[in-house]
Amino acid sequence: MVDEVLTQSRTPEQRSPVGRLVYFCLTNKLIILLFVLAVVFGGLLVAPFDWRFGRIRRYPVPVDAIPDIGENQQIVFTQWAGRSPQDVEDQVTYRLTVALLGIPKVRTIRSYSMFGFSSIYVIFEEGVDFYWSRARLLERLNSLPSNTLPEGVTPVLGPDATALGQVFWYTLEGLDPDGNPTGGWGPAELRSLQDWTVRYWLLSANGVAEVGSVGGHVKEYQVDVDPDAMRAYGVTLDDVVSAVRAANLDVGARSLEINQVEYFVRGVGFVKRLSDIEQSVVKLRAENVPVSVRDVAKVTFGPAARRGALDKEGAEVVGGVVAARYGANPLQVIHNVKERIAETSNALPARVVFDRAGATPQAVARYAVQHGFEPYGADGTLDRDVWLAHLRAMPREEWPPWATISRLTIVPFYDRTGLIYETLGTLNDAISQEVLVTIVVVLLMMFHLRSGLLISALLPLAVLLCFIAMKLFGVQANIVALSGIAIAIGTIVDMGIVVCENILRRLHDERAGDEDAPAGSSTVAGDATAARGTALETVHRAVSEVGGAVLTAVSTTIVSFLPVFSMTGAEGKLFKPLAYTKTFALLASIVLALTVLPPAAYLLFRDRTGKRRRTLHASGRSRLVSRVTVLSAAVLVAVLLARYWVPLGPARGAVRNLLFVILLIGGLMVGFRAFQWAHTPLLRWCLAHKKTFMTLPIVLVLMGMTAWLGADRLVSRLPASVRNLGACRQLVRLFPGFGREFMPPLDEGSFLWMPTTMTHVSIGQALEILALQDSAFADIPEIESVVGKLGRADTPLDPAPVSMFETVINYRPEYISNANGHPIRFRYDRRREQFVRDDKGELVPDRSGRPYRQWRDHIRSPDDIWQELLKVSELPGVTSAPKLQPIAARIVM
């Protein structure tokens, strides 16, 4: 009987390709189930979220905060120490620029010549492969004629990273076991550890292109010549330079065979001590009397000349910057760096630090005698190794109050992980809230619980399918790309609502016809078989009727995005991810609506027995129970929506937010119902008064143009007598026009303070100014950390002069939040109107409590924090700074 039902005459829509696809899905539910499982499994494997599934390896979509809209460029960096910018320009920059002009697919070349170095930016055409361009540059640099550049000058290719590749900044600090700063480390010592230990550890992390050092002093051998001694011995400066250079060489000779044993002869000359340089012979005087370096110069250790420094809240520090490799997943790169830091944290050196106020010589000697060890070494200084071994063997409670262990620690001060997590959290919130809104709307508009759940279940499935497409097409997940998914969710819901509503309507008509038909001739088994066949045919017909229209609607929307795909340059890099993800989401919605939704609706909505169901035409009592169930489910969903959305803010409390959500949804539902009731008479009136009605859209268009362009542009075309009227002036004041911003500002949770001072400022004076500014910023209660940089870091990505400051100011979030940016609730005493704290003075987490606000009462937004920064930043000789954030500033530069 089923075959007879299914083979009866079908409509043209059912015989169309869409109808045949729907019928295939209805009759092959196992294949659809396997498809759904594959989408879920594949989507979970490539989702950009930081999920963990035990030992299962994931391949997430690369994720960053915003798209990289920088140009397709490579950097050629050349150092020529001690040379003026003009010398660098004439001898290095100009010659290299001319030599690089012949590289294919080069659009333009920009260059900067500064004291001691040259930076050349080779801009390639769009679409040129990043590593292909690097290969062409290396070929040209390796084939330069030998006399192109001065002797000893070698150009190098910058790291394979972009302007947004600087994802992790850190400082090296000595911390005690409680995590408090202790000091005890010199700037030269810290810089040596950074250059020769920490830097190489972090470079070995997967995805890291470069680790640049900044701050501190580079330790070097310094030879201070004595002109009088040189004149007395008849030695020139070139003689001293040659002697020092020759003293740092290993000389290879030949092998000798002695007593049937082969010996290699070589001269060992690498410098290891100051005496190695001091004893180097400069020249021979009469009677072969040697003149050594120490006779004409003084050899010492000293700091090298530097063009950059790092300051943290007024104290000079040493740190570094990690640049992610081009095409790598920034979030994964940061995780790899943090894992490497955790693996090697115990390998960093530690030492004992004394508090000078309490560690008097008598107290130190007395403590050492009591514990049976010698506190001082043979040279009379503290034996730090003995003290370190002693304190490590003692319980923390028995340490002397004036001594502690200071372990060198990598302390990050700029970590893009938080911003990336907040970006992903925004998508999570958008999807969750839109799912809840969808359930409420469907329940209240259709009064059908199962259809609301079915439509809402398709939303996460469509998002997972979109993630799979992003992975296949290489689309990075960022705030712009993820916003395309959030925007398309409304269309995904529309597809499901249209299909579900038509299925319910068809099933309603079918059951209404069954109730009117006479009963009794068929068996129960026959009724069940016929019911199943009729339900399948009804669902098939219902989906086929609207499938073509739904497909056409989605296709029209996708076609409207074609101009976005043709964009080039920065515009294309910014908006193409949104176009891709929105297109993927729309395609996913139509695929799921035509393949997964029909069999799911058939299983949920069909009659399960041969008895006539009375779901829609039930008795009054059953109808009342159904409505109460739907309303109860809607209220429950509204409670969840108020808890996740918090439209009035966390400080307003859960009750007020719930009332606001209920009133908002109730008002919208009443408005929709009123529009449905008034639609027919309103449409009749509009058709009868076409000219009168057309004035409304004309007025709306004029008002929209005025709000967009600004009233001044429209009023300027009017006569002067009309422009001077009070009404026109008022109109200009009310409608100034929309601002034009290519990149909308993103709340990164930090500011980048970038003032400049006099170009001829010394590095000592610049460091003093930077310390004063950082100390003033750190005193603001809303500021969490302040780290400022002057000059350049040791990387080609940073060509800043000494007169330029870059201060990263991290401000606290308005409420104490978790990694995803969601406020954490703490226990609150309503009687005392204060938060409850434990014995250590810490807040006590409580899900039913309140979020803790960290800003002062008059601080309402990050703009207010910026105004606080402006109040304390005024210093003589220093310019003000534009309002920038780290990522936005990298894009601008």
Image (cartoon, rainbow, N blue to C red):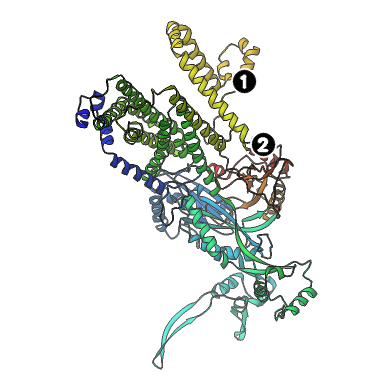
| Quarter that holds the N terminus | top left
Q: Nearer the viewer, residue 776 or 627?
A: 627
Q: Which residue is drawn at the image coordinates 62% and 20% (left, top)?
A: 734
Work out how far the residue at label 2 is from the one at label 1, CA to CA, in angstroms.
Answer: 25 Å
Q: Which residue is drawn at the image coordinates 28% and 42% (left, top)?
A: 31
| The label number, if any, that marks residue 437 in the structure image | none
Q: Which residue is drawn at the image coordinates 54% and 60% (left, top)?
A: 341
Q: Residue 639's x, y, as percent?
A: 55, 34
In this rendering, the label closer to the viewer, 2 or 1: 2
**Residue under pointer 2:** 860
Above or below: residue 219 compared with residue 523: below
Q: Is residue 30 left or right of residue 166?
A: left
Q: Nearer the viewer, residue 322 or 640?
A: 640
Residue found farthest to the top:
688
Q: N-terminal of the two: label 2 or label 1?
A: 1
Above or below: residue 467 compared with residue 726: below
Q: Nearer the viewer, residue 92 or 283?
A: 92
| The label number, if any, that marks residue 734 in the structure image | 1
Above or below: residue 829 compared with residue 156: above
Q: Residue 485's x, y, as percent?
A: 44, 37
